Amino acid sequence: MQGTMQHAFGNPSSTHWAGTPAYAIVDSARRQVAGLLGCKPAEVVFTSGGSESNNQVLKGIYFASQVPGSHIITTSIEHPAIVEPCRFLERLGARITWLPVDATACINPDDLIRSITADTTLISIMHANNETGTIQPIEECAQIAREHGIPFHTDAAQSVGKIPARVDDLGVDFLSIAGHKLYAPKGIGALYIREGTKLEPLIHGAGHELGRRAGTESALLTAALGQACELAQDLSAMARIRALRNQLWTGLKEGCGNRVVLNGHAGKCLPNTLNVSFAGHIGNEILAQIPELAASTGSACHSGRVELSPVLQAMGISPEVGAGAVRFSLGRTTTTEEIEEVIKMLIPLLGKRA
Ligand SMILES: Cc1ncc(COP(=O)(O)O)c(C=O)c1O
């Protein structure tokens, strides 16, 4: 990014001396993103992030298909960046099916098969869930979509850079990336659009991004996303991160016994995400006592009432257990000493082993 600021401040669309270095940076970044996803550079469109990529697919298919009352299938554990555009399209006449999940936050592909109708225009299933880390059976679902001739999208904001997410291995037609989930800055993302698939642009204007997303590209931000994708090709650090996540889980389990419960799937999960419930506690009350710990809860408190996140609700978690949910996110810089420190800070707050 520093090099781009110094040497490539022109407009990537300009063909003069100031624009050509900026174009070269955007072009190279597109190749780096395509390299990580295993697609053609022309199939990558830069966006402002995961939300825009998701909105582009959902609304772009809806407006391109022109099927009145078209049917979209998604899941009950999606990020608001899927849920809200779906609700918006519902107000315009679309019909939405929200697939249920089991107690580990995983969907059942048989439910997908049963939900498909003649007017299904899109299936959108997240690759890995942002709250629990549970990985969905995308390959199987994408195969079902293909057999029925229905375009398939996955929101891979959480998975890209942590587990392999090559578009042909997954079998998807669209895939959303959020740059800040893989160490690029906030405000940049990308959408993979399989060659030959038709989407109405979300942002109309000049012909940037081959007419798929108007607006002068930011060479600065694309350079960062490109570099992040290049670095993310090497997932060898994820084994260490998974070991640290397991160290955290084991430490909490040893300290709290049955009073700590895992929210999510024990094996089919991201290496960096651990969501646990401390029974008999309220997540944000625990975190308020450890201000040096940056973690999230799975519930919100409204006038003394605890409301579980839609994801925990969809998993069928009881309000008593869900209220004590805390989500830990680890990263490439997390150390074993930090994990030990977190365990040491948490255990005294949580009471004795049951
Ligand atoms: C699964 C998922 N999808 C979409 C988004 C939205 O991405 P952005 O904040 O880049 O718009 C996020 C961000 O947290 C996410 O976790």
Image (tube, grey):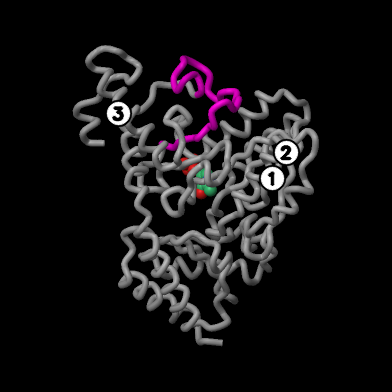
Q: Nearer the viewer, residue 256 or 30?
A: 30
Q: Is residue 331 above or below residue 175?
A: below
Ligand 1 has an atom within 8 Å of the beta carbon of the residue at disc 3: no
Q: What kind of secondary structure does the magenta stretch mostly adopt? A: loop
Residue depth check, mark 1 versus mark 3: number of the one nearer the observer: 1
- On the image, numbered disc 2 is attached to which residue? 148
**Residues at marks 1 and 3, CA–CA distance in whole angstroms:** 38 Å
| Circle 3 crowding by C-alpha within 10 Å: few under 14, some 14–19, many from 20 | many
- On the image, numbered disc 3 is attached to which residue? 25
Say what amino acid the circle numbered 2 marks.
Answer: His
Q: SS at mark 3?
A: helix
- On the image, numbered disc 1 is attached to which residue? 144
Q: In which quarter of the image is the C terminus?
A: bottom right
> Which residue is found at the position 46% from the left and 63% from the top?
328
Say what amino acid the circle numbered 3 marks.
Answer: Ile
Q: In this view, does 33 lie above or below 115?
A: above
* Label 1 or label 3, whichever comes before in sequence order: 3
Q: In this view, does 305 lie to the left or right of 201?
A: right
Residue 152, position as x, y percentages in the image: 63, 39
Q: How many labels does the image show?
A: 3
**Residues at marks 1 and 2, CA–CA distance in whole angstroms:** 6 Å
Residue 352, position as x, y percentages in the image: 50, 87
Q: Nearer the viewer, residue 211 or 315?
A: 211
Q: In which quarter of the image is the N terminus?
A: top left
Q: SS at mark 1?
A: helix
Q: Would residue 174 be counted in the magenta stretch? A: no
Residue depth check, mark 2 versus mark 3: number of the one nearer the observer: 2
Query: Is mark 1 in CB contact (under 8 Å) with mark 2?
Result: yes
Q: SS at mark 2?
A: loop
> Which residue is found at the position 31% from the left and 67% from the top?
335
- The segment highlighted magenta reads 188-212
Residue 290, position as x, y percentages in the image: 40, 69
